[in-house]
Image (cartoon, rainbow, N blue to C red):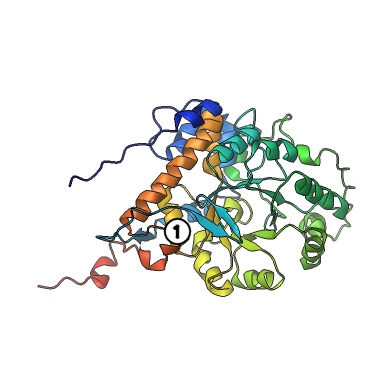
């Protein structure tokens, strides 16, 4: 029997007819959208999206963490009944490729989050809509499929936070994802060097009706950070208050420490998203993938965990699933594909990632997502380690 040669996958005709955009012929894998996006986004905006914070140390760590693992190929496994269906916290999803809550998507496309929502709907992907979206959360909900979650930033006033939660409930979002790791977002040096500033017409429309908080007046011995920026940062008390205000499951995004994971689990959150905010919060934080196994060990095998930050391919997704994630969030690739080909580009990117994942599953002998575990991976051996691990004998 001759092996089948895999070629780049195309989007179905029915999907292409319902979405806008055109897929450039240079796209052969999901990561191709990253390099091509430079042609479609204004240079300062691209540098802002591609960068993290500070010197982008954590951005680089997120990418390199995946390269430290190789996938074992397995032989003679029957995978003809294979599929990518996953069940997470009682919800069933067609595949474990979720759309991360990326803010200000009008930086990539004039229709912004509405295009990403249409793509997620067409490809049966769970969309997580950002508090800082450039389109109203209600409009995004109408464009998205039935599997849609709302990402929440705590606001300085509880009333404004509660307003967002109630609007999300009324719009039919089925979970609240609270981001807790971004009270401070230091500027990316690469974005600063590129001269980036947020365009005047790209605003967080969900917050438009909220009153502007009073300006903080600091004393001469007070810190702009501790007594200033961090004055309104949420605490455990705020989280407990929020969970008492909604019947929706509450997920926490931005978890990197096992002790935080255990504390959140004990307080009854629905699940955790292991994330360093794509390297946009603390420059020098560990890669999300690096911390995933320790957090999985801390919360046990059954507690829902998602992974965010650094995903660029289906093999990255496979590695995240093998190390303990139930699903993954796609952030920057979503923006890149959106800039290149709108909704059709995002849908095509999701399809590419899913099929790249399926290739890994098939060749690793894992017909279903639950079959993927740490035994499917091996630490990559560097050239200087090779002789020690595999000694040469005569």
* 18 left or right, relative to 251: left
Question: Tag count in the figure?
Answer: 1
Residue indicated by mark 1: 369
Residue drawn at point x = 41 percent, y = 67 percent: 374
Residue 254 picture location, percent across and down: 63, 59
Residue drawn where x is 26% and y is 72% of the image = 388
Residue drawn 90% across and 47% down? 214
Please state which of residues 170 and 43 is positioned toward the viewer in this rendering.
170
How many residues crowd around disc 1 within 10 Å: few (fewer than 14), some, or many (20 or more)? many
Q: Quadrant of residue 243?
A: bottom right
Res. 285 visible in picture:
no
The residue closer to the viewer here, 61 or 301, is 301
Horizontal and vertical percent position of residue 45? 60, 34
Image quadrant in which you'd find residue 393: bottom left
User: Which residue is farthest left?
Assistant: 394
Image quadrant holding the C terminus, namely bottom left
Q: Quadrant of residue 90?
A: bottom right
Left or right: residue 282 compared with residue 156: left
Q: Nearer the viewer, residue 240 or 47?
A: 240
Residue furthest front as drawn:
81
Q: Tell me the SS state at disc 1.
A: helix
The reply to whether residue 207 is in sight is: yes
Q: Position of residue 371 (x, y in %)?
A: 41, 63
Residue 123, how many percent across, how many down? Answer: 52, 40
Relative to residue 169, is residue 226 depicted above or below? below
């Amino acid at each position: 029997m001759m092996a089948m040669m895999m070629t780049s996958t195309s989007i179905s005709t029915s999907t292409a007819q319902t979405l806008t955009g055109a897929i450039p012929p240079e796209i052969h894998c999901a990561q191709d959208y990253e390099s091509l996006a430079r042609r479609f986004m204004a240079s300062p905006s691209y540098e802002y999206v591609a960068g993290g914070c500070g010197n982008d140390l954590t951005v680089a760590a997120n990418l390199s963490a995946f390269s430290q693992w190789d996938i074992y190929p397995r032989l003679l496994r029957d995978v003809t009944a294979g599929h990518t269906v996953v069940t997470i916290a009682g919800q069933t999803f067609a595949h474990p490729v979720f759309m991360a809550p990326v803010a200000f998507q009008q930086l990539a496309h004039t229709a912004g989050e509405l295009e990403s929502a249409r793509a997620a709907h067409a490809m049966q992907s769970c969309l997580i809509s950002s508090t800082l979206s450039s389109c109203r959360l209600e409009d995004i909900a109408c464009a998205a499929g039935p599997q849609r979650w709302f990402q929440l930033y705590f606001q300085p006033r509880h009333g404004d936070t509660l307003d967002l939660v109630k609007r999300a409930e009324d719009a039919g979002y089925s979970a609240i994802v609270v981001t807790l790791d971004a009270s401070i977002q230091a500027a990316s040096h690469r974005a600063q060097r590129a001269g980036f500033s947020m365009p005047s017409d790209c605003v967080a429309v969900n917050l438009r009706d909220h009153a502007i908080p009073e300006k903080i007046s600091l004393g001469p011995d007070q810190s702009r950070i501790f007594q200033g920026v961090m004055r309104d940062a949420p605490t455990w008390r705020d989280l407990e208050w929020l969970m008492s205000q909604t019947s929706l499951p509450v997920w926490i995004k931005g978890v990197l420490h096992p002790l935080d994971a255990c504390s959140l689990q004990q307080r009854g959150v629905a699940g955790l998203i292991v994330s360093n905010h794509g390297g946009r919060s603390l420059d020098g934080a560990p890669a999300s993938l690096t911390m995933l196994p320790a957090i999985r060990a801390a919360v046990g095998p059954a507690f829902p965990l998602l992974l965010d930050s650094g995903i660029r391919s289906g093999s990255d997704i496979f590695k995240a699933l093998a190390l303990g994630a139930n699903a993954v969030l796609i952030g920057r690739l979503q923006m890149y594909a959106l800039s290149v080909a709108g909704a059709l580009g995002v849908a095509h990117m999701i399809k590419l990632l899913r099929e790249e994942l399926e290739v890994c599953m098939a060749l690793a002998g894992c017909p279903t997502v639950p079959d993927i575990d740490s035994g499917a991976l091996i630490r990559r051996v560097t050239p200087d380690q090779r002789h020690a691990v595999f000694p040469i004998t005569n």
